[in-house]
Image (cartoon, helix red, strand yellow):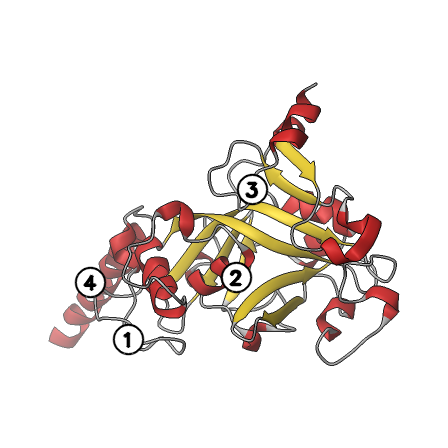
Amino acid sequence: QMKKLKQPSRRTGQKKQRLAEAEQLQSPSDAAQSPSPKDPYVGLPTTLGPQRSIYFSSPKGHFTRLGSEFFDQPAVPLARAFLGQVLVRRLANGTELRGRVVETEAYLGPEDEAAHSRGGRQTPRNRGMFMKPGTLYVYIIYGMYFCMNVSSRGDGACILLRALEPVGGLETMRQLRTTLRKGTACRALKDRELCSGPSKLCQALAIDKSFDQKDLAQDEAIWLERGPLGPSEQAVVATARVGIGYSGEWAQKPLRFYIRGSPWVSVVDRVAEQEAQA
């Protein structure tokens, strides 16, 4: 009889614990997202415990994960649609890092002289560009930095993620960037420096070549959530892509898109902004 009395008490305690955990998940405090040293990419100092996504802990979570249908559109509209959405990276210990997408570039496939798929050539390196929409294509530059692309509709077409506005896990991002970047490692990084470039955001989110060919619609370590607010058409700047001067006329095509006025954009084009307002 005593056992029968204790059992519901234990269940009640477990329910209270789950409610307390849910409240912690909804807390905006970044301190709750600090990592343990179990992260597979870098060793970080032991701080507070990890934080799990409501998306994975509850079928009725507050966040909406974007599925395959979102990615199944041509590169240009997809590059625009990415703006304002939230990229989430879940580390091995459950800690989550979040960044709102503020800058992208579209690569149109075989006819695009700046694309790695120009001429329709497929290699083991660029295979992700030819896989189903939403597939990640991660490549290395300068032998040490990574850039992350997402395939769109159309063989060899994709978008490059160029910059994020960090919105969750900033201290963890700062530690990852400080550990992985070269040069002035002793200088503290400002918030606007954490994800203001394609390789910077990969460092900040601990994204490397192992993410190549992963499915952004299905993977449990990285995904895209619908942002609270998307930029209006007037708030999007369309301008030339960065660092592709070798590609002739394609270097000038307005295939880079960013949110006007965002301090987290990697390269601001004042001329394009003025022309858009004229």
**In the depicted structure, whether residue 92 falls above or below residue 270:** below
Q: Nearer the viewer, mark 2 or mark 3?
A: 2
Image side of residue 9 versus residue 180, left or right: left
Q: CA distance from mark 3 to mark 1?
A: 31 Å
Q: x, y percentage for residue 13?
A: 20, 62
Viewer-nearest residue: 226 or 198: 198
Q: Decide: few, some or many residues near mark 1? Use Cα within 10 Å; few <14, some 14-19, many ≥20.
A: some
**What amino acid does circle 3 point to?**
Gly
Q: What is the number of the mark on residue 199?
A: 2
**What amino acid does circle 2 point to?**
Ser
The answer to which of marks 4 and 1 sits earlier in the sequence is 4
Q: CA distance from mark 2 to mark 4?
A: 45 Å
Look at the image and tell me in which quarter the C terminus lies.
top right
Look at the image and tell me in which quarter the N terminus lies.
bottom left
Q: Nearer the viewer, mark 1 or mark 2?
A: 2
Residue 94 figure quarter: bottom left
Viewer-nearest residue: 213 or 4: 213
Q: CA distance from mark 4 to mark 1?
A: 30 Å
Residue 209 appears in the figure: yes
Residue under pointer 4: 13
**What amino acid does circle 4 point to?**
Gly
Where disc 1 sits, the SS reads loop
Q: Nearer the viewer, mark 3 or mark 4?
A: 3
The answer to which of marks 2 and 3 sits earlier in the sequence is 3
Q: Nearer the viewer, mark 4 or mark 1?
A: 1
Q: CA distance from mark 1 to mark 2?
A: 23 Å
Q: What is the number of the mark on residue 169?
A: none
**In the depicted structure, whether residue 191 falls above or below residue 276:** below
Residue drawn where x is 88% and y is 67% of the image = 119
Residue under pointer 3: 84
Where disc 4 sits, the SS reads helix
Viewer-nearest residue: 55 or 266: 266
